[in-house]
Each structure stands twice: as structure tokens, then as C-alpha cells.
Image (cartoon, rainbow, N blue to C red):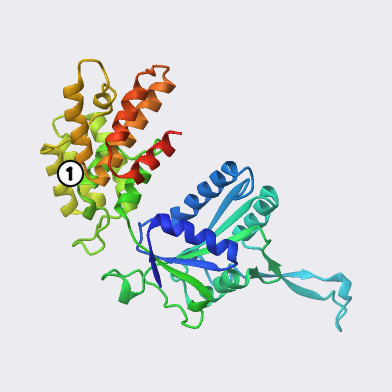
Amino acid sequence: MSKVTYSAAVTQALACFKSGVTPMFEGHSGIGKSALAKEIESHVKSQYEATGGKEGASAVATVIIFGSLLKEGELGGIPESAEAKHLGKDLMGETIRVNRYTIYEKIHDVLRLSLEVGPTGMVILFVDELNRTDPATQGELMQLVLDRRVQNIVLPSNVYIMAAINPDSEDSDGLDYGVTTMNEALVPRFAYYTLHSDTNTWIKWASRPSSNVHGDIVEFIADHGNLLHMPKAKGRMKAMPRSWEHFSRLYSYFEEVGGSDRLNNIYTACQAKLGDEVAKAFTSWLQNRDNPLIKPEVLLGLGKKGNEAADQVILNKLSRENVPRTMVTLSNLIKYMETKRSEKKYDKAWGTAFYMSIKAVTNIDIVFGQIKDLK
């Protein structure tokens, strides 16, 4: 199997779709497998707009089937008796009856959405937790995933399938997901990827203007990237990329409420979502932040006449920041500028300040990424 980061997984999945290959992604719970389809959805929409319809898809819909929730026979259709008058009567003079099969609700959704998005659109059928089913149900899912059919229903050509599984016991870092080991004869029929967390990719995602992850959380991960994903941590609760997003909501609430118990409440919430080790590290970081990120207001003050010496101190600090912290700093700057623009409080002089900030960054990939986000 091939190890891929989140961004690479999007590229590989699209290549599989175009090549008629079914991609399968293995990864720990909370690493972002379920969100991968949505990321692909966003990507192909952007492609379509950027290329004038030459690439990507005009409309995209995603249908998710959770294998762990299926029961035997549910996907393949539960038989129901129905009269078949066209077959005449049996020897007893009764109208002959036959078995018809119900259509699983999600398959019905796929067929409906396939018509709605049309030939230039795309429906992503994401089969999650493929290996958390009993063997009989897994066999039904395999017919769908590998043969693109359920009973006599063949999936339309604008439907693309991807699957995800949890690690088997020998690859799970001691975690028991209760999986059914896949038949080794079937594995080679997939493009098999192992999804692993990547701190810079997560920071880039969490720093987007559309993201709801609190800036303090992003800054903390920029300083403590090793705590983003800790599947081997002691205790029942372990830090996962998805867990940080959930904790961010709790953190935002307690930051807004404030009060004398603020730090204790934050510690308790962090412990409940991410475990004791992370809770101690995060609250300690809150109490002892001695190297805060450069605030947007400071960067936007660059370029004023007579402040050249002070500006150079700020730019020197920005140039010395590591990659994660630089990404967060520039993303915060863009968020701030967009907010002020929406409030009609945008200052044209900020263009010069933004250019000075970008010019101070030595990593060219970050520069291109931030300019792209700004556009």
C-alpha cells in the first residue's frame, strides 16, 4: 500500500476516477476519511470554474454509505412477494407470485442525483467503514464497489466510487476497530492507500477564511505539530485531526463566556476531547505564550513613512518564523483583510503592507499559496 497525505489523497482519488480504478483509503478514525469526499467535491467544482468546463464537474453530489450500519441483505435488496399476473396461474389456480427486491435508500439517492447533476456532473459514492461489517454484508458491498452494480441495477457512468477502511489489528497501533479482515484476493482490485496526518496540510485547511477552527488552536498546532494526531497516546481519548475541530467549538465557547473558571473549563473540555496529555500541554501553552504570532493589525501598519526601522524589526521576525507559523500568520492576515472588506472598512494602503509581508517570507510555496487564497 502507498502512504499519502490528505492533499495527495485528493489527487490520487481523481486520477483513479479518470482511470476507472476504485481507490480505497485506510486510516485511523478521526483522520479525515469521511471528509475526503467533500474535499474532492470542492476541488472538482473549482477545476470546472477555472478551466471553463474543460476539467472538473459542473455539479457534484456525495452519497455516503456506512458499512458498519448495514445488515445482511439490506444493500442487495430485501425480497417481497408480488403477484405476476403476466405469468398466469399455478396448478392450484392461484396467480403466480414472484420475489421482487426492494432498492436500498442510498442507491435510490445515487440514481436520482445522477440524473440531477447531468452528464457534466459527478456523483461520488463513498463507502465508508467497508471492513466493519460481517462477511456476508461485506460481500454485498464488494459487488457494489468492484462491479458497480446491485442486483440488476448498474450504476450510471457519472457515478464514481471510493471506499475507506479502518486498520486491521496488526496495523492499528493497538486500537481495536472491530474490523473483518478483507479477503486478500479482493485487495489487489483496489488502488490501496494509507492516509496519514500531515500538520502543514491541516494548518492550511484550518486557516482558510471559511474554516471555523479558532485561531488559537491553529497557532498551537503550528507550535506543537506532534500533538495533532496521537493514536498511540495513553487513555481512551486520543488527539485526532477531527477532534481538534470539535474541541475548537468548545474552546470558542469558553473564551466567549470567560470568567474565573475559564482555564479550568478549557482544560476539562480539552481532556474530554483530546486526552490528558494534550490538555496539559494546551493549557500550559495558554498560560505561557511568550512568542505570540504577529497580529494582522501590526503587519497592516507596515510601510508608513518614518517607521522604516520598526518595520524592519517586524519583517525580520516574520522571516525567521517556521513554515507552520508563517502559514497561520499570513492566513490570519488575509482573514482580517476580508472581514474589513466585507465591513467596507478596507484601507488601500494595506496592499503595500501585504506586499511587504509576502516579500519577507523566504518559502516561495507559502507565498504562492497565500496569493492564491487572496485571489
Give the residue displayed 39% in from the left and 35% down from the top: 209
Q: Amino acid at mark 1?
A: Tyr
Image location (x, y in percent) of residue 126 = 52, 60
Where residue 110 sits, quadrant-wise, is bottom right
367 w.r.t. 93: above or below: above
Give the residue displayed 33% in from the left and 28% down from the top: 354
In-image side of 21 versus 311 (left or right) = right
Image location (x, y in percent) of residue 298 = 24, 25
Foreground residue among 290 and 25: 290
Q: Which residue is mark 1?
A: 267
Where residue 95 sits, quadrant-wise, is bottom right
Q: How many marks?
A: 1
Where residue 111 sits, quadrant-wise, is bottom right
Foreground residue among 158 and 351: 351
Give the residue displayed 62% in from the left and 62% down from the top: 104
Asked if residue 17 shows in the view, the reply is yes
Asked if residue 65 shows in the view, the reply is no
Helix or strand or loop: what does disc 1 sit on?
helix
Image location (x, y in percent) of residue 30 = 35, 57
Of the 4 image quadrants, the one containing the N terminus is bottom left
Mark 1, other Cα within 10 Å: few <14 / some 14–19 / many ≥20: many
Image location (x, y in percent) of residue 129 = 45, 65
305 w.r.t. 69: above or below: above
Give the residue displayed 33% in from the left and 36% down from the top: 331
60 w.r.t. 353: above or below: below
In-image side of 105 versus 187 (left or right) = right
